[in-house]
Amino acid sequence: MPATKYIFITGGVTSSLGKGIISASVGKLLQSRGYNVSIQKIDPYLNIDPGTLNPYEHGECYVTYDGAETDLDLGHYERFLGKKMSQANNVTTGQIYQTVINKERKGEYLGKTVQIIPHITNEIKNRIKLLAKKFNLDFVITEIGGTVGDIESLPYIEAVRQLKWELGKNNSIVIHLTLVPYLSAAKELKTKPTQHSVKMLLENGVQPDIIVLRTEKSLTKEIRQKVSLFCNIESDSVIEAIDVSSIYEVPLKMQEEKLDETILKKLNLDVGQVPDIKPWKEFLRKLKNPKKTINIAAVGKYIELQDAYKSINDSFIHAGTHNEIKVNVTWLHSEKIDVSNYEQQLSGFDGILVAPGFGHRGIDGKILTAKYARENKIPFLGICLGMQIAVIEFARNVLGFEDAHSTEMHPSTPYPVIDLMEEQKNITSLGGTMRLGEYSCNLKKSSLAFDAYKKTTIHERHRHRYEFNDEFLNAFAEKGMVPSGINPDSNLVEIIELINHPWFVGVQFHPEYSSTVLNPSPMFSGFIHAALQNKKSINKK
């Protein structure tokens, strides 16, 4: 293919329609045909990145291997494509404006008046094309966040208009995702919101090439023809995206709708090669036909919003499906767990996970959770703060350090078992003290971690500020909490385990970020196997 092809995906009518899933599904189908594909998310908010956003505001903050804090849709891209995303795959309005203002301050615009057009739109176009240059791609799929008609999205729609003209014929297409609501009283699907959404796009100079209709009822031929007529596209370019039980069914539904073939035809490319998606179909077969079931309690503090722990939930799906186990996850709010009810709330589960997070809220409930899992020999996985919680609980209740804590929550604790590294203590910027991105970890061969990963060196992603304080390492090891994973460069403890427990592991990194559909996280697989063994042992009693 002589040049990179560009696919722009916009959304209309309402937010949360699933642009990220459609983007990932298109990418998966094109990748299955042998193309080199990457996906980019453009977010119209003014934050530089979602790293400082509350999960209630924006869901999970996803971390790339190279240390970018990004939108959760990049997690979808990686899980579908099985391919690492980078800093270049997420762009925000904050980044765009910051770059333009910095250039203006340096005098790079030679005294010109700096404006939305051309300076902001030029920077947007540069970011879109940069991805293709950086990775020598056949396809760049750019998902534009927000909804057409939002003020924040206007510069991006204008940049798409300019790019379509600059790239020339057969080098780019626009896919517009909208909602076709079903009115139960009238018993019919309504296309008027889609018509108005397309009209808004047209007012901004952009004609969609394909329209994907999100719907809870199957589209009739008449509905497709109506959208075709009023939105100026061919009827075979009207694609149905019906609700499905799992997001992982969407690529197959899009293939049934021949979305990938339509894209290739519009870009004047050969459609002869059939996508190789047999492994994906096998995954879905196992997902729908599990042989065993386990029940996991997951304790966190943002449980009201399902997207706050998106990667963890999906990691359970990946690892469970790979092992033909259905994992039922019950999320428990850590603020509602206390000394009066923790045994009752946590009993009856095959395994317990303590989720990551920041700040003091809900800490006491998490500490009680780790105590319950340790004392009752329940398989336990603590992720990031969850690992630190396990350390604090052990220090208090086993080592006898009654006021042990993390200096994040209790700066003057006499037993700072979790603390900032010395070189971090004088840095005040929130991001400055963070360990972000992928780091190496050496595993001890005689450990649960090694049993899970089956290798001595692993690479996992981090997003944290505080570390295990190795001044207390000997005290912990003497009582049975040992380090099984160490960073080879900094000598920091990455994994802790209990030697007198069936399966109790805390990891400072985030194994959920590297889990994909076809390559599930070994740490989650190990945890699930332990939970299954625990269930079997209980059933034998």
Image (spheres, rainbow, N blue to C red):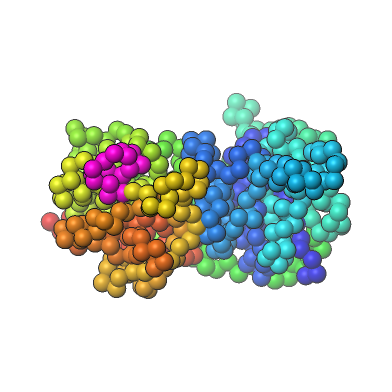
Height in image: 409 above or below 377?
Answer: above
Height in image: 488 above or below 507?
Answer: below
As drawn, which residue projects farthest toward the top?
185
> In the shown orientation, is residue 44 left or right of residue 467?
right
Residue 198 seen in the figure: no
Residue occupying image coordinates x 63% and y 46%: 19
Dividing the image into 4 quarters, which one contains the N terminus? bottom right
Q: Total marks drawn?
A: 0
Quarter where residue 77 is shown: bottom right
Residue 302 seen in the figure: yes
Residue 303 screen position, x and y as percent: 40, 38
> In the shown orientation, is residue 94 left or right of residue 526?
right
Q: Nearer the viewer, residue 210 or 131?
A: 131
Residue 42 screen position, x and y as percent: 66, 46
> In the shown orientation, is residue 331 left or right of residue 6?
left
Q: Is residue 205 magenta?
A: no
Q: Is residue 415 magenta?
A: yes
Quarter where residue 301 is shown: top left
Residue occupying image coordinates x 24% and y 58%: 473
Residue occupying image coordinates x 72% and y 61%: 132
As drawn, which residue projects farthest toward the left?
541
Q: Nearer the viewer, residue 494 or 290?
A: 494
Residue 394 screen position, x and y as percent: 21, 50
Q: Which residues make up the magenta segment? A: 404-418
Residue occupying image coordinates x 52% and y 35%: 57
Residue 26 screen position, x and y as percent: 65, 57
Dividing the image into 4 quarters, which one contains the C terminus? bottom left
Height in image: 34 above or below 415?
Answer: below
Height in image: 538 above or below 450?
Answer: above
Q: Main secondary structure of the magenta part?
A: loop
Q: Nearer the viewer, residue 391 or 506?
A: 391
